[in-house]
Image (cartoon, grey):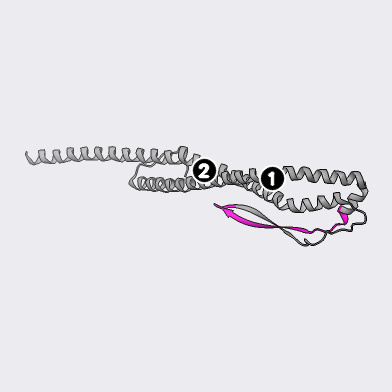
């Protein structure tokens, strides 16, 4: 529907704009409900992300400390060699879930082997063992934090888009429809008054001719 053009003042157009107003109002209600749901989910995700992040920093500092000790005691070459030759024991699977039409990836971390370290002990020390164990324990929480952060970003984009549509409906489309309805209704009413006045004049002339 193009706005700003001349509106034809007919009853058909009046019905059309009334129907368009009803549909636009219904869409506005749906979008407003969607906006509220998105906002609620963002607030929940922010709270979860904050709690998850809060439990990451201290363990990360311990991991950095363990890795740094390993570099200092074993040397860069040995630590890098162990890292490159160690097979992956953690697997991250990505699933998709939907929140009010917003696609959000969900991460699941599983261990392939939890019984033994995936490297030999000859060229390593307790620092590497400690760092490997800490990383295994912390990785699910890191992935969960990343999941929450990505969810917040995706929901925020959906919220922005929804709010723009709402603004367009509330400030442009619905007011324009309502203005067109008022204009057409007033024009039809004025036209009907004019026709009624003409009809009265015609009837008066007919009556006056009959009385001659």
Q: Position of residue 32 (x, y in %)?
A: 48, 45
Q: Where is residue 91 in the image (x, y as percent from the top left)?
A: 75, 58
Residue positioned 43% across, 41% down in the render:
174
The residue indicated by pointer 2 is: 165
Residue positioned 83% across, 46% down in the render:
66
Q: What is the secondary structure assignment of the residue under circle 2?
A: helix
Observer-nearest of 190 and 156: 156
Magenta stretch contains residue 100: yes
Residue positioned 66% across, 46% down in the render:
52
**Image-quadrant location for residue 47:** top right
Observer-nearest of 55 and 44: 55
Q: Where is residue 26 in the image (x, y as percent from the top left)?
A: 43, 48
Q: How many labels does the image show?
A: 2
Task: Point out the frontmost of discs 2 and 1.
Answer: 1
Q: Residues within 10 Å of mark 2 (few under 14, many from 20)?
A: some
The answer to whether one can see residue 110 in this image is: yes
Q: What is the secondary structure assignment of the residue under circle 1?
A: loop
Highlighted magenta segment, given as a residue range: 83-102
The answer to whether one can see residue 157 in this image is: no
Furthest toward the left, the residue is 212
Query: In this image, 155 relative to 113: left or right?
Result: left
Furthest toward the front, the residue is 126
The residue indicated by pointer 1 is: 55
Query: In this image, 61 relative to 106: left or right?
Result: right
**Real-space Cα separation, disc 2 to disc 1, in angstroms:** 38 Å
Magenta stretch contains residue 106: no
* Comes first in the chain, label 2 or label 1: 1
Observer-nearest of 96 and 177: 96
- Quarter holding the C terminus is top left
Residue positioned 39% across, 40% down in the render:
178
Q: Where is residue 37 in the image (x, y as percent from the top left)?
A: 52, 47
């Amino acid at each position: 529907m193009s706005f700003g053009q001349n509106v034809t003042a007919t009853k058909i157009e009046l019905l059309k704009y009334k129907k368009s107003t009803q549909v636009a109002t219904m869409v506005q209600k749906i979008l407003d409900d969607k906006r509220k749901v998105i906002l609620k989910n963002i607030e929940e995700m922010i709270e979860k992300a904050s709690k998850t992040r809060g439990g990451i920093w201290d363990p990360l500092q311990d991991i950095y400390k363990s890795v740094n000790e390993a570099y200092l005691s074993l040397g860069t070459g040995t630590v890098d060699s162990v890292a490159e030759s160690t097979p992956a024991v953690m697997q991250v699977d990505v699933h998709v879930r939907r929140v009010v039409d917003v696609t959000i990836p969900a991460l699941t971390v599983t261990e392939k082997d939890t019984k033994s370290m995936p490297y030999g002990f000859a060229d390593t020390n307790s620092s590497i063992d400690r760092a490997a164990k800490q990383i295994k324990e912390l990785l699910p929480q890191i992935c969960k934090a990343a999941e929450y952060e990505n969810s917040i970003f995706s929901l925020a984009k959906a919220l922005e888009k929804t709010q723009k549509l709402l603004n367009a409906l509330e400030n442009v489309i619905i007011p324009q429809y309502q203005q067109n309805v008022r204009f057409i209704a007033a024009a039809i009413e004025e036209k009907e008054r004019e026709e009624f006045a003409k009809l009265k004049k015609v009837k008066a002339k007919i009556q006056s001719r009959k009385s001659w």
